[in-house]
Amino acid sequence: MSTGCQQKQRLQTEVQEALNRLAKACTESIEALHSQNNRALDRLDKELEIAMGNKERLMGALRQHVAEHGCLPGDPGRSEHSN
Ligand SMILES: [Zn+2]
């Protein structure tokens, strides 16, 4: 209980994974742009859109959880006393 909020940590991990996918799609988009690979660029553009939406959704979930639960992001030490 006092080692931090597991729900928050789970959401943070998911946000991090979403950001990694987003960054990967960005890097690959730049590569596709450089090599003028239009087909890949098209596919990656859609991937970026999905990854961005996914990130927004998870970020919103994390924010809402923190607001409702009172646990602070990046502060796993003191989450259980505010409710
Ligand atoms: Zn929490």
Image (cartoon, rainbow, N blue to C red):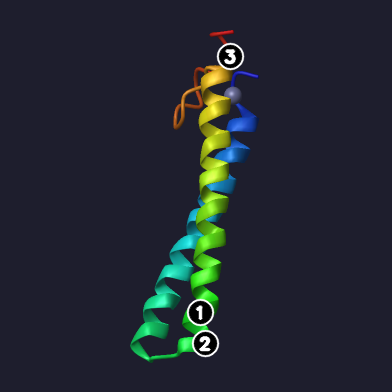
Identified by mark 3, the residue type is Glu
Report the residue that reaches farthest toward the left. 34
Return the residue at label 3: 80
Instruction: For marks 1 and 2, give the CA distance.
Output: 5 Å
Please name whichever residue, 57 or 23, is drawn nearer the observer in this view of the structure.
57
In the image, residue 21 sits, relative to residue 6, either above or below, namely below
**Between 77 and 67, the one nearer to me in the picture:** 67
Query: Which amino acid type is marked by label 2?
Result: Arg
Q: Which residue is mark 1?
A: 42
For the point 34% across and 87% down, the residue is 34
Q: CA distance from mark 2 to mark 3?
A: 50 Å
Q: Does residue 58 appear to the left or right of 75 in the view shown?
A: right
Residue depicted at x 44% and y 63%: 23
Q: Is residue 32 above or below residue 69?
A: below
**Which element type, helix, strand or loop, lies under badge 3?**
loop
Q: Which residue is mark 2?
A: 39
Give me the residue at 42% from left, 69% from top. 26
